[in-house]
Image (cartoon, helix red, strand yellow):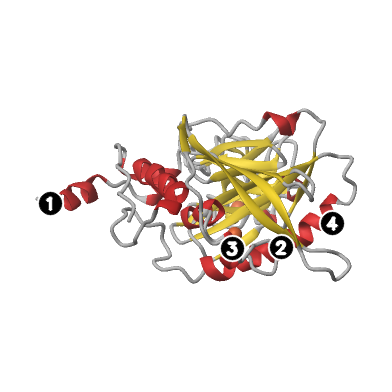
Amino acid sequence: MSMRSDMDSSVRSYEEAFSPYWHPVAFSQELKERPLPARLLGTELALWRTGSGVAATRRYCAHRGADLCAGEVSGEGLRCAFHGWTYGTDGRCVRIPSQPGVPIPAAAAVSSFHAAERYGLIWVCLAREPAAPLPEWPELETGKIATVALPRLDWEVSAGRMVEIVLDVTHLSWVHRGTFGNPEQQEVAPYEVERRAGGLRAQISYPALAPALDGAPPKVDKTTLVYEVFYPFAARLTFKPTLFFPHTVYAIASPWSEEKMQCFYFASYHPALRHFPDIFVKSELAILEQDRLIAEGQRPRAHPLDFSGEVHVRADRLPLEYRRGVIALRTGGPVELPTPA
Ligand code: FES
Ligand SMILES: [Fe+2]
């Protein structure tokens, strides 16, 4: 038996590998008094606010499959619009209005999942036991920092490929021409990637181009960029430019399937920077559109489970280290980095 088929036999399905992790499924502000539909790893969800927090259950009623997101939240739980069956946060039916006083059948239940609200996001873990806690971003909880979010990025891209493009150091000078990319800076200086518990860290310096406002040529803005990965699909990027405002970007890809994700993307900044949100949203949407055109065209769409189908060079070290970690989550064992060309 070859090594390859040994590996294949131990590879977990995509859903099995990533369902034990927390993934964002909505921005907090999207979830109001009505239940909200969401999707994660092929599972259709109904999210709703309870008296004390948030709940996530399967989206379709156990009685006749009606959409629970068309229902309402009552004091007892999530009430189906079709016949009024009501579900508690544990997914068990607590009321069948057509037959009060009759014991509720045990099968009258919908699956329920772990749900939490943090960093302005609603997070869900589909597995019975989460394999890791939520990422720790304490700076977002001090109350001393402001945040601004983009609309969800709804791309035809796998979550792993999305994170790889976020971590890709070489593409800045190519894909981001006309926004901040500097076409003069094509060589990538060697950089280190630190492996950490549950993630990675790397730092580079990049001579970004800052557009001048008065029609003058763009200025070079020497920017320090710190990349941090939180497995499986979250990244935090700290930008320390010299001409623009320092800020931190959070990009969390949430997998709908092995080939499709939505990305929750927001920035934190000093609240005194009153104009930051407008500038950030406008420029970042232009930058991300450049990324989307490349990422949606990549094949295979699924994040590769090995290194053999692509060619790797030294500058790819950060996305490669990231891929190594993701493959390890699928195979459950240590994975060696390929030797760069
Ligand atoms: S389908 Fe939901 S109560 Fe009947
Ligand atoms: Fe990019």
Q: In the picture provided, is 89 more to the left or to the right than 31?
A: left
Residue 252, given in percent of the width and then of the height, sits at 59, 47
Residue 73 falls in image quadrant: top right
N-terminal of the two: label 2 or label 1? Answer: 1
Q: Amino acid at mark 3?
A: Ser
Q: Which of the labelled discs sits on residue 278, or is there none?
A: 4
Residue under label 1, please give it. Answer: 2
As measured in the structure, the alpha-carbon distance from the residue carrying label 4 to the one carrying label 1 is 55 Å
Rendering coords of residue 210 (x, y %): 75, 59
* Residue that numbered label 3 is attached to: 173
Q: Residues within 10 Å of mark 2 (few under 14, many from 20)?
A: some
Q: CA distance from mark 2 to mark 1?
A: 46 Å
Tell me which amino acid carries mark 4.
Asp
**Spatial separation of the CA atoms under disc 1 and disc 3:** 41 Å
Q: Which mark is residue 199?
A: none
Q: Earlier in the sequence, mark 4 or mark 1?
A: 1
Image quarter of the C terminus: bottom left
Identify the element where label 4 is drawn: helix
Callout 3 crowding tier (Cα within 10 Å): few <14, some 14–19, many ≥20: many
In terms of sequence position, does the residue under pointer 1 or pointer 3 come before the other?
A: 1
Which label lies toward us, 1 or 3? 3
Helix, strand or loop under label 3: helix
Near mark 4 (Cα within 10 A), the count class, few <14, some 14-19 or many ≥20, is few
> Does mark 3 have its CB less than 8 Å from ligand 2?
no
In the rendered image, the vertical position of residue 132 relative to residue 173, given as above or below: above
Q: Are dots 3 and 4 in contact, CB under 8 Å? A: no
What residue sits right under mark 2 in the picture? 285
Q: Residue furthest left?
A: 1
Tell which circle, 2 or 4, labels the residue nearer the N-terminal end: 4
